[in-house]
Image: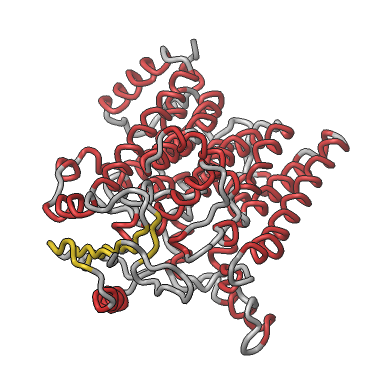
């Protein structure tokens, strides 16, 4: 049984008396948690969030809030892997090999599961389970460091963290694999288990092309902080740093351009100096560096990364693992990367909480020789983290499964289901963005706003929802113009109801 002495206790120094009720509740909670084995606690937290993520994302899909970009894209990719085909994704364009967009061959691991359960829900549940696994190593580490109450705060903090919740609610993405890998690697680093940290970081090079740089930082951490443990540890760290850097370089500069239909790595053009336009590459890089903290939304991102640890994560060198992801996001000219939406911050959440656990260790001093945090300071840090977690739950969609409105179906969704049911399986469909994700499990789907290239067969069916709120990748005016063109080409109107039109190609 874990002693409650591992949990920070109130200081006995004289001073203003605090209310007895909150402290008695905390003591009762601690006594209850003391009876729960650490692994049971950690895995129970992970199971809870796996269920919440699944319910949240499945209901969003059933309410037709998911989209072809991105759930449909990943389903077409994994569907191809499940049938041992090259990952050609029609939603990206005719003959488009998705490995020329992002290098994520690790997704092939979901192929056998999808073959048994061919549904977009398979991807959503797999993502929920993968991301929830990040709670386990960090909660166990917090338990060893400061006891069960700290484990509860950290485990629930990771599970309810805004970056992971936002990713779990936004379709499906390959970073679902990176979240647990980084959590296990960062925990191993904090416990000086260098080989385990390196092995957990190695697969990151197969998740996404930029994550090799995160693996490289893990290697640099091992080489520097494990240098006193001998030459073997230093070589392990240096080897991982070199491998991660080379892997990302080869993926971005060789593999992706070779696989891309347009003979280039599309996202490299968003980085400073890539185009070497006005003023040259050096001028563009200088401009990007000068605007590293502008516009202010970038500061909001940094603040949102510091608040889960109540700023204590700044005491831990593990926080350095955030640098590669933050660098490409803040230097990019794509404003979507700067904020706190979408899925881009999911990989940072395990690092943020690893920094928190590392900072509250009794033996962890701060920068410049500062002493470790006192018990009172640790208590305040954990309280600050818990308060921030509680504040963000109503803001981000983790609370959605508890809302009755989420479990009702609108008349528009019912109409869409009835119309989509008229499309036979195994056919080709040109669809609007949100309807596409409802069809990729049984048809070959392209976008209704994508003109058919010369020599390409016309889709057998066209379905478009004029109420689709997304403007990327399909502008409503362009979609409407192409639907009109299909009609002019002889497509027959099969259904036209509640803003949704279904056309069939003439025989």
Going by the picture, which residue comes out furthest to the right?
Answer: 231
Q: Please state which of residues 462 and 472 is positioned toward the viewer in this rendering.
A: 462
Q: Position of residue 266 (x, y in %)?
A: 57, 69
Task: Look at 39% across and 45% down and name the residue there.
Answer: 168
Q: Is residue 255 above or below residue 262?
A: above
Task: Look at 48% across and 34% down and name the residue there.
Answer: 113
Task: Look at 61% across and 44% down and name the residue there.
Answer: 316
Q: Position of residue 439 (x, y in %)?
A: 33, 51
Q: Position of residue 87 (x, y in %)?
A: 54, 52
Quadrant into which the C terminus falls: bottom left
Q: Position of residue 211 (x, y in %)?
A: 62, 52
Going by the picture, which residue comes out furthest to the top?
Answer: 1
Location of residue 221 (image quadrant): top right
Q: Please state which of residues 319 and 19 is positioned toward the viewer in this rendering.
A: 319
Task: Look at 15% across and 54% down and name the residue there.
Answer: 415
Q: Please state which of residues 106 and 190 is positioned toward the viewer in this rendering.
A: 106
Going by the picture, which residue comes out furthest to the front?
Answer: 507
Q: Is residue 464 left or right of residue 195?
A: left
Q: Is residue 102 above or below residue 353?
A: below
């Amino acid at each position: 049984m874990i002693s409650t002495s591992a949990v920070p206790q109130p200081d006995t120094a004289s001073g203003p008396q605090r209310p007895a009720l909150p402290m008695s509740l905390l003591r009762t909670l601690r006594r209850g948690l003391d009876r729960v084995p650490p692994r049971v606690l950690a895995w129970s937290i992970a199971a809870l969030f796996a269920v919440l993520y699944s319910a949240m994302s499945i209901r969003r899909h059933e309410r037709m809030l998911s989209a072809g970009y991105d759930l449909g894209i990943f389903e077409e990719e994994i569907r191809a892997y499940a049938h041992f085909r090259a990952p050609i994704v029609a939603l990206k364009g005719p003959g488009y090999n998705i490995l020329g967009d992002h290098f994520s061959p690790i997704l092939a691991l979901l192929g056998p599961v999808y073959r048994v359960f061919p549904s977009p829900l398979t991807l959503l549940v797999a993502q929920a389970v993968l991301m929830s696994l990040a709670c386990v190593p960090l909660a166990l580490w917090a338990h060893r460091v400061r006891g069960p109450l700290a484990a509860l705060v950290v485990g629930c903090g990771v599970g309810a963290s805004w970056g992971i919740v936002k990713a779990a609610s936004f379709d499906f993405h390959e970073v679902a694999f990176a979240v647990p890998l980084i959590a296990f690697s960062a925990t191993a680093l904090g416990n000086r288990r260098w080989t385990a940290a390196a092995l957990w970081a190695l697969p990151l090079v197969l998740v996404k092309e930029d994550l090799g740089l995160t693996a490289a930082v893990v290697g640099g951490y091992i080489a520097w902080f494990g240098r006193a443990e001998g030459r073997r540890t230093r070589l392990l760290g240096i080897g991982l740093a070199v491998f991660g850097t080379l892997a990302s370089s080869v993926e971005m500069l060789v593999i992706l351009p070779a696989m891309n239909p347009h003979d280039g790595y599309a996202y490299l053009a968003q980085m400073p100096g890539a185009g070497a336009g006005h003023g040259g590459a050096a001028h563009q890089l200088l401009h990007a560096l000068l605007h590293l903290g502008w516009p202010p939304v970038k500061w909001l991102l940094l603040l949102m990364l510091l608040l889960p640890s109540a700023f204590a994560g700044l005491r831990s060198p593990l926080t350095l693992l955030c640098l590669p992801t933050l660098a490409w996001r803040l230097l990019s000219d794509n404003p979507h990367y700067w904020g706190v939406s979408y899925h881009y911050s999911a990989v940072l959440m395990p690092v943020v909480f690893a920094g928190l656990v590392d900072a509250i260790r009794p033996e962890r001093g701060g920068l410049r020789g500062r002493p470790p945090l006192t018990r009172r300071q640790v208590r305040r840090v954990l309280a600050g983290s818990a308060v921030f977690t509680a504040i963000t739950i109503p803001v981000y969609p983790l609370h959605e499964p508890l809302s009755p409105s989420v479990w009702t179906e609108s008349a528009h969704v019912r109409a869409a289901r009835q119309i989509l049911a008229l499309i036979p399986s195994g056919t080709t469909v040109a669809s609007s963005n949100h309807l596409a994700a409802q069809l990729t499990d049984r048809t070959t789907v392209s976008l209704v706003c994508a003109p058919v290239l010369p020599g390409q067969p016309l889709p057998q069916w066209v379905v478009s929802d004029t109420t689709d709120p997304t403007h990327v990748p399909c502008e409503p005016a362009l979609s409407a113009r192409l639907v009109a063109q299909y009609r002019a080409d002889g497509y027959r109107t099969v259904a036209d109801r509640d803003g949704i039109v279904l056309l069939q190609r003439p025989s």
